Every structure is written in C-alpha cells, then in structure tokens.
Image (cartoon, rainbow, N blue to C red):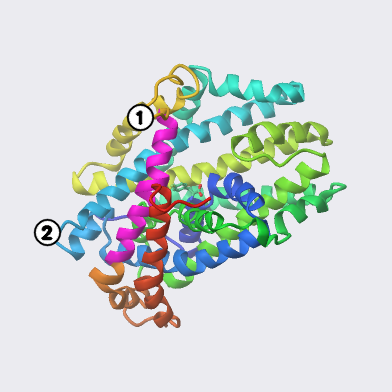
Amino acid sequence: MKRDNFGSKLGVLAAAAGSAIGLGNIWKFPYVAGQNGGAAFILVYLLCVAIVGIPVMVSEFALGRKTQANAAGVFKKLKPNSKWSITGYLGIFTAFIILSYYAVIAGWIFAYIARSATGKLANIAPDQIGVYFESIIGSNIEPVFWSLFVIVLTGFIVMSGIKEGIEKYSKILMPILLGILVVLMFRSLTLEGASKGLEFLFKPDFSQLTTKGVLEALGHSFFSLSLGMAIIITYGSYVKKDENIASLSLQVILVDTLIAIMAGIVIFPAVFAYGFEPQAGPTLIFITLPAVFQEMPFGALFETLFFMLIGIAAITSTISLLEVSVAFVTEEFKLSRKKTTVILSSILFLLSIPSALSFGALSGVTVFGKTFFDLFDFITSNIFLPLGGLLVCLFAAWVWGAKNVAKEVTSNGIFEFKWEKLYSFTLKYIAPIAILLIFLYSIGIVKLN
Ligand code: PFF
C-alpha cells in the first residue's frame, strides 16, 4: 500500500500547528499563566519549550520521517524484536484515550456555538449561567450527541486521507482561526479598562511562581505541543525528505506559543474591563466569559466567534489524535483507511460515553475516587504522557542515537543542523531528567506545595 504524504510545506505546518494548538492553548494556558505569576510563568514556559520541547519535537519528527511508519512500526523498524515497540503502543493507546474525553469537551464547545449563534446564551441571566452550563453537561443526551458530532466530523476528515483530508482542512481552518483570533484581540484590547487584564497576564510576579508552577510549565509544554503520544511521530512519517524538520519544529513551537499568548490577550482584558474575576478551569470560558459577552456591544456575535475559534482549535487537534490509531491499524492490519476510520470512530464513540455522562447519569460512578472523565484525564495527562515522552526521549537519544537523529534532521546532508551539539546535549541529559521530574511529580512521588 502506498503511503500518503503531506503535499506542501505550508500544509505540514498547518497540520502540525493545528494539532498543537488546541484546548490547551486557548483555555488552559491563559489561566495557568495568570495563576502562576503572569509573565514570570510565561518566561519559564518559554524556557521549558526551548530546553525540552524543541529536542523532543525534533526527535519525534525525525523518528517518523526516517522510518515512514506508524508509531508502533517506528520502533519495530529501528530496534526489531525489542521491547521498545511498547513505547509506540503506549503512545497510540494514550492518544486514543485522550481523544475519548477531549471529544466530550469539544462537544460542550459545539453545544455552546449552537446556543450562542441562536442567541439563547445571551438571554440567560448572568447568575444563572453556571446552573445552565451544569444542566447542559449533566444532561444524558446532549453531551453524548455532541461528542458523536465531534467524532463524526473528525472521522470524516481523517478518512479523506493526509493530503485530501488532514492537510486540506488544516489549510482552510488554521487561517480562519488566526483571523478570528486577531478580530477578538482587537475587540478586547480596545475595551476601556483592558490594561488591567494585560497587567494580570504580563506583569511578572516572581513571588507567585512556585516550584510547582515550574513543573506545571514543563508538563503543559508537553501537552500543548502534542508531544509524548505518537502524534508528531505519526505526522513526521508523512513529511518529505526535502523538508527541514528542525525549522519546522521551531515554526510549530513558535506559532503554538504565540497563539496561547494571543488567547490570553483575548480573554483577560475583556474579563477585567467588565469587572469580572479571572476564574480557573472550565468556569472561565463556560461561565465567566458568556457573562462578559453579555455586557459587550454585539456580544453574541463575538461570543459565537470565540466559541468557533475554540471549536476549530479542538477539531484540528482531534484529527491528529485519531490519525495516530488510524495509521497504526491501516498499516499493521492491512485494512483500508475508510474501514479503519469507521471501526475506530465507532469504538471511540462507545468509549466517550462514560466520559460524556460523567457529569450526569454516571456522576456517582467512580473508580479510584474519580469519575470516568477525571480518571481518563488523570491517567493520560499525569502518567502516560510524561512516561511516553520519557521513553521517546531515551530511545531517540540513547538507543537510536542522537547522532542518527541529527543525520535525519539534515536529510542526510541536504540541510545544515546548526545547533546539533546543543540539541544532543539537551536531548541526552537535560530533557530526560526534566521529564522524569514531571512524571514523579504528577504521580505524587515528588511532593511540592
Ligand atoms: N496540543 C493540543 C492542545 O494543546 O490542546 C491537543 C492535545 C494533544 C491535547 C494531546 C492534549 C493532549 F494530550
């Protein structure tokens, strides 16, 4: 079976950046930054991205492109008959489980787009929006319906292939995302009192920055850059040899970080301009922001745009999460892409139901004291993601070898790899130690306050 490829430089960038830019950037980054000392956190985040994000992303692209295989195939090809293929399976499994609850959150977003565009959300009394949100996610039908909607949409794009599906739609959706973001940024910055929001986001307050904040920055850089779960390895396998993967990695990281900061510039000036408190977690976008938009002239319009922005960001991420397992099954079991996508999307839908109902019918059902939604999130974000990242890093640095990664980065001598020495050093020593720290912290072995 001939493997599909990305057709253009811009296409690869749009797809990879599309995967990276997601709920992590628009929803999580702004409030985590706000809570941890604003610019102080952003500086640490940039450092984490530079020290750990860049070497791991470059390695993942190199592993994929060298072998032109799915995430499990990569390890089988480079280290046949070894246990390292577990790393690939772990990544594929992680991406699949993440998708099962990520689709639920994306579903809430689409439920909000529908309500916002029809003006329903604008008519809810501000102090009732919280109850309203809970009634939506607590219903036994809506979250299931909208998760299905997200999975079908994702499946449709993935089924169409790399060039005709993922690349084509990323090239359409990413410019729209950027356009909406710029419009909303302009709106937010021109509100009276916007500067307080900027201060909240950008004023470096190092007293707010704890060791915990530093580890959160590290963990978030992984989540945000889609590392440690086979996504970039899989996308790398569709990148052609005439592409410079070192520059590609830098571009993806730059765009991802920029969008996260821009999202903060959209959210906080508006929140502060209307005298609201910057809340954390789901409350910020699902409860506080709708109340903020009610105060704004033409608020329903901006609100619809805002939720469309997050919806687009989520879909370009869900397609990358699904592609990981679709690539694996089509290649390892020699099934057609169409059949594979239908089968996997159906399994995914079934798997998403416990998460979709975690706030309603199944809210009382817990495993290890957690609802299904929380359990899936905890296991993947705190255990599988750092573990996968650590294994990929160790494999690239010590098993396949940093030298081989560098050779692949140069496309066997076509490109220069200027910072090879620095890259090898961080990949071999700094990145694994940093990721190990995140891992020990997230499973509770290293305790910080
Ligand atoms: N990187 C995307 C985000 O920041 O939302 C998508 C994503 C991939 C999220 C993998 C979470 C994850 F574990």
Sort mark 2 into few (<14), some (14-19) or many (20+) by Cα contacts within 10 Å: few
Residue at 61% x, 55% y: name it.
259
Image-quadrant location for residue 136:
top right
* Image position of 234 (left or right of 377): left
Quick check: 63 above or below 106?
below
Query: Mark 2 sits on what residue?
Result: 81
Query: In the rendering, at what x and y percent does residue 216 appear?
Result: 52, 53
The amino acid beneath tag 2 is: Asn
The amino acid beneath tag 1 is: Leu
Query: In the rendering, at what x and y percent does residue 286 appear?
Result: 64, 33
Residue at 53% x, 51% y: name it.
21
Is residue 115 on the magenta stretch? no
Quick check: 287 above or below 384?
above
Q: Are marks 1 and 2 in contact (CB under 8 Å)?
A: no
The disc at residue 351 is 1
Residue at 76% x, 54% y: name it.
198
Magenta region, main secondary structure: helix
Region rendered in magenta: 372-395
Residue at 40% x, 29% y: name it.
369
